Image (tube, grey):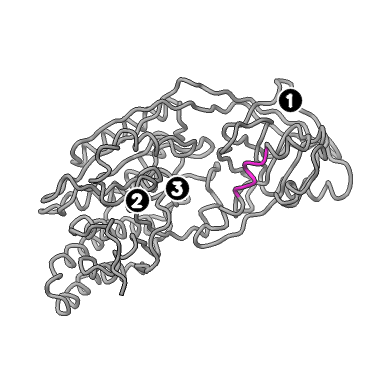
Amino acid sequence: MRRFLFAAAIFSLALPCFAGDFQTAAALCDRALGDPTAWHLLESLTAGIGPRPVGTPAAAHARDWAVARLKALGFANVRVEPFAKPSWHRGAESAELVKPYPLRLAVIGLGNSVPTPPQGIEAPVVVLRSYAELLAARPGAFKGKIVVVNQPMTRTEDGSGYGAAVVTRNGDGEAAKRGAVAYLIRSVSTGNGRAPHTGAIWGHTPVIPTAALGVPDADLLQYLAARGPVRLSLKLANWVDAKSQAWNVSGDIRGSERPDEIVVIGGHLDSWDPGTGAIDDAAGVTITVAAANLIGKLPRHPRRTIRVVLFGSEESGGSSDAYLAVHKQELGKIVLAGESDLGSDRAYAVHLPEGAVAAPALAMLPAVLAPLRVLVSDQPAQHAGSDVSGLEKAGVPVLAVDQDASRYFDYHHSADDTLAVVDRAQLNQNVATWAGLLYLVADSKLDFRAKPVKH
């Protein structure tokens, strides 16, 4: 017997009333560690379809792939929910150092950027070491120049370094206020590779051409600018299709006693275009599908329905609002929601709504996840993911699974985001974590909306 089943035997002596539930959850975790489903799905989605930006033929292929796979695995109520979604498309891009010597730089346009004129832009460069330095500059300080912000990102296990660095991605408006004709940033990345990292510009209408440089190239420009004049030629070709469409695809593992009560989980099907979107977010798709699939094979399903939603437009937004719009009438029946969208490296903690950890119905959860080296945190879930944020704002309780993000941002949004960077054992450890967690929350009668009793 493996360690989970041994642990189940010990636990059943201590808490006989929970023994059956514990043994089922522990057996699911054990099975997940050797189950090939997530890996096979991941291979099929990434290598079989490739990058999946909204508005491309590949996005439609991913929709059809999702429907076919969910049906083949036995999910019930497989649905496709279309929604209108303007899509941004990348054309030819280049950045060339003109002075002090000619050199082709590694560059990638940021999503929603405006294009340069067809002939490009050639202008002197000013390099700033931080976004704060840009904000501190007076209006007109960089008139006629290409502004480069070379702000590094800090590597952290929980990914919090991303939040501090990603603000640079939205600085084109601030650069334009100060007279800039184009805006470049150091890739929001913890790696040192030359492959640049893309991502979307959020919160405003972009006004000047904006792109990311590979980390070594951003450092090179800073070195050169400290020693004399630097001049750069930039060309970005892109366009927007205002009439494109995206789709949310879902399938259910129907509950045995309370099928109208739903636990919503999932990942997003869409990806950026330089790589094949393996860790962002084919991994989240396959982790949640594989976990729910294992539960669906049980002789008795948990009491509540588990719904896996494969969201169609996370990278440029829209999935969350679209799902909320279609499912507003059943908000009261969605008991819990969560998303897997931080790659495929090991899970190390789970967070539930306030008070849920102390509930007797989930007393066995720490013991179920302990062999996976996953902590059940006493800190409530703060944020469950972009695609379920609409449900969260509408009052649906959420759960979150923390993953090791130490190397995630080495590859995120870049050409290196491929199957090659996925560790199969860690992928399956995530499946095991989600399977044990989902089974117990879906089989409980716990009201996750109830306020905890204060003692």
Provide the residue designation for mark 2. 338
Give 411 or 157, whichever is nearer the viewer.
157
Q: Amino acid at mark 1?
A: Gly
- Spatial CA span between label 2 and label 3: 17 Å
Residue at 42%, 53% (x, y): give it. Answer: 383
Which SS class for mark 1? loop
Left or right placement of residue 162 versus residue 309 in this view: right
- Residue 410 position within the rendered picture, expressed as x and y whole percent measured from the top left: 56, 52
Within 10 Å of disc 1 (Cα), the crowding (few <14, some 14-19, many 20+) is: some
Provide the residue designation for mark 1. 120
Disc 2 vs disc 1: which is toward the camera? Answer: 2
Q: Secondary structure at mark 3?
A: helix
Callout 3: few (<14), some (14-19), or many (20+) C-alpha neighbours within 10 Å? many
Q: Quadrant of residue 138?
A: top right
Using the image, tell me which numbered label, if any, was put on residue 47.
Answer: none
Please say whether residue 421 is one of the residues in the magenta stretch.
Answer: no
Contact (CB < 8 A) between labels 2 and 3? Answer: no
Q: Is residue 65 left or right of residue 105?
A: left
Outermost front residue = 454
Return the residue nearer the eye: 327 or 245. Answer: 327
Residue count near mark 2 (Cα–Cα under 10 Å), binned few <14, some 14–19, many ≥20: many
Quarter assignment of residue 6: bottom left
**Would you name the residue on which mark 3 appears?**
279
The stretch of residues the image draws in magenta is 166-172
Amino acid tagged 2? Gly
